[in-house]
Image: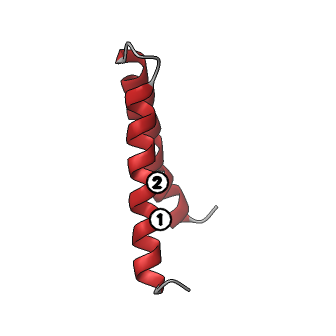
Amino acid sequence: MSIPSLIFWLIFVIPLVALLIWVMRQDKRRGMAGLMILLVIVAVGVIYMYLKTGGQ
């Protein structure tokens, strides 16, 4: 892995996974809040990439 990849993992991915695990443990409805957060993040990522690439 290159240095930018490691920085990305340390700054974004690891805290996001920790946050999702914490939210799922706090949720009494078996992780529904964590799944909703994950769906929103994925949807925003897909829309962002679609707009940046012009749909290609």
- Mark 2, other Cα within 10 Å: few <14 / some 14–19 / many ≥20: few
Is residue 15 in view? Answer: no
Judging depth in this view, the residue of 8 and 25 nearest the camera is: 25
Judging depth in this view, the residue of 8 and 42 nearest the camera is: 42
Q: Which amino acid does label 2 sit on?
A: Val
Query: Which residue reaches farthest right?
Result: 1
Q: Which residue corresponds to mark 2? A: 42
**Quadrant placement of the N terminus:** bottom right
Q: Which residue is drawn at 40% across and 70% down?
A: 48
x then y, percent, for residue 44: 38, 60
x then y, percent, for residue 11: 39, 51
State the CA–CA distance, disc 2 to disc 1.
6 Å
Q: Do the residues labelled 2 and 1 touch (CB within 8 Å)?
A: yes
Image color mode: secondary structure
Q: Which residue is drawn at 47% across and 37% down?
A: 17
- Mark 1, other Cα within 10 Å: few <14 / some 14–19 / many ≥20: few
Q: Which residue corresponds to mark 1? A: 46
